[in-house]
Amino acid sequence: MNLCMAQVKRIDYGDGCGNKYVLKLEEGKAIVKYEPMTIERSSSGFYSGGEPFEKDIEIKLFNQIAEIAMQAIKTKSSHIDKRIMGSGILTIEINNSKQKAILAPDSKIKENLEKLLGETKPKNP
């Protein structure tokens, strides 16, 4: 495992629709918590991000997400100065420090991060 990944303890991500993901390592386990946008809070009055959940995920998936998140923090060309509709807000906790970035709505790294985060959602039977 890459040493850099071993240092990532928590990832907070708010997607362009207002859904929030919190991923963290606790006691040797990787946990994801998903807090979706609700119809009541949505600006359209119609959008729902689905059902909230909290569950364990594989360490391998956590590390893949952490790697993309670190790339997103380092890729300054994908950053914007202010949060706008469709942008993503990313915070990574490494040891006792936090790094933050607002990702442009059309950035490829944002798309890649959201694709991996989608893999944390429970599978429909």
Image (cartoon, rainbow, N blue to C red):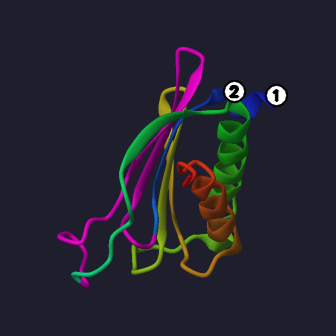
Question: Label 1 sits on what residue type?
Answer: Met
- Residue lying at the far left in this picture: please name it: 40
Q: Is residue 53 left or right of residue 121?
A: left
Question: Label 2 sits on what residue type?
Answer: Ala
- Residue lying at the far bottom in this picture: please name it: 44
Q: Residues within 10 Å of mark 1 (few under 14, many from 20)?
A: few
At 56% from the left and 52% from the top, the residue drawn is 125
Looking at the image, is 83 positioned above or below residue 37?
A: below
- Residue lying at the far right in this picture: please name it: 1
Q: Position of residue 105 (x, y in %)?
A: 54, 79
Q: Position of residue 64 (x, y in %)?
A: 73, 44
Determine which quarter of the picture holds residue 82.
bottom left
Mark 1 and mark 2 lie on one chain; the one further toward the N terminus is 1
Q: Is residue 81 left or right of residue 52?
A: right
At mark 2, the secondary structure is helix
At mark 1, the secondary structure is loop
At 63% from the left and 53% from the top, the residue drawn is 119
Determine which quarter of the picture holds residue 30.
top right
Kindly identify which numbered label has been placed on residue 6: 2
Kindly identify which numbered label has been placed on residue 1: 1
At 58% from the left and 48% from the top, the residue drawn is 120
Q: CA distance from mark 1 to mark 2?
A: 7 Å
Q: Is residue 96 left or right of residue 62?
A: left
Badge count: 2
Q: Is residue 20 magenta?
A: yes
At 68% from the left and 30% from the top, the residue drawn is 59
What range of the chain is rendered magenta?
16-44
Q: Is residue 3 magenta?
A: no
Q: Are marks 1 and 2 in contact (CB under 8 Å)?
A: yes
